[in-house]
Image (cartoon, rainbow, N blue to C red):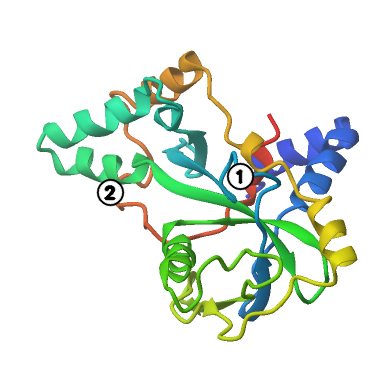
Amino acid sequence: MIDLEALRKKHEQLQNPASANQNSDFLKKFYQIPEGTNAIRILPWKDEEREFYAETKIHRVPQPDGNNRNVHCRKIHGEACPLCDMYYALWKTGRSEDEDLARKIKPRARYYMNILDRESGDVKILSIGVILFKKIIGAMLDPDFGDITDPESGHDFKIVKEMEGQWPKYDQSQPRPKSSELGTKQEAAGIMETLHEIHGLVKLEEYEDVKKAADSLRGETVQGSSTSAPSKDVPDNEYLTKLQS
């Protein structure tokens, strides 16, 4: 059977090759975590006014074709969020199918930070979920490590990615015990000049757009709603592409 959706996407690429190239260039900024042990250096931000990381939350909204649409939660900006309103309302109905849908659209934390890929020497954006982020913060609160982002006395971080079925696990990830310099003073200065604008990735969605996403689920049977969405830390290229808009 012909996959009409795949053909439609291919047609859009052919119609707008410049956009396709932009998407490709944008995704190249992100660090795709390979399976196994990977050495990175988490980088500080340019100044002390902002944290070294940027935080958002994502609603994964089921679509009729079985895929998910990723929507920024507006509450991260202190604004009303129709999808959050719907999430809490679904739990109050007492119906199992509504609880399943609530689990799917639950806002899930996402964090972005600049890192130096020790293998390639490139500065990339690391996009992670709460599990790996807790490990990083836990290490920084440990007096044996402290500020692991410090260019002179910080620590490289080992991301250990193991696959459990189709889901990644990061249980063995930890900082290297020995502190090290980011590089020579000249190298460190060059690295800090190439930081990506991570804070600009956390965009405020238009209220009406989020409301439409919530309204599309009301009173409809959503394909796959009988299975709750996993809370695993799963990379999502479709979401990364959406960050451009």
Residue 2 at x, y percent in the picture:
67, 47
Dividing the picture into quadrants, the one containing residue 231 is bottom left
Could you say which disc has been placed on residue 225 in the image?
A: none
> Percent x, y for residue 181?
73, 74
Going 74% across and 46% down the picture, which residue do you hit?
196
Res. 4 in view: no
Q: Residue furthest left?
A: 94
Residue 48 is labelled as 1
Residue 172 screen position, x and y as percent = 47, 82
> 10 Å neighbourhood of mark 1: few (<14), some, or many (≥20)?
few
- The relative height of residue 146 versus residue 1 in the rendered view (above or below) is below
Using the image, determine if residue 155 lies above or below residue 187: below
**What residue appears at the point 36 percent right and 52 percent down from the top-left corner?**
229
For the question of whether residue 18 can be seen, the reply is yes
Amino acid marked by disc 2: Ser
As drawn, the residue found furthest toward the bottom would be: 178
Q: Identity of the amino acid at label 1?
A: Glu
Query: Quarter holding the C terminus?
Result: top right
Say what secondary structure mark 2 lies in: loop
Q: Quadrant of residue 92?
A: top left
Q: Nearer the viewer, residue 168 or 228?
A: 168
Q: Position of residue 91 (x, y in %)?
A: 17, 37
Q: Which residue is mark 2?
A: 226
Q: Nearer the viewer, mark 1 or mark 2?
A: 1
Q: Are marks 1 and 2 in contact (CB under 8 Å)?
A: no
Q: Is residue 3 left or right of residue 81?
A: right
Q: Nearer the viewer, residue 39 or 184?
A: 184
Disc 1 from disc 2: Cα separation? 46 Å
Label 1 residue SS: loop
Q: Image point 67% across, 77% down: which residue?
A: 39
Residue lying farthest to the top in this orientation: 208
| Nearer to us in this view, 146 or 33 | 146
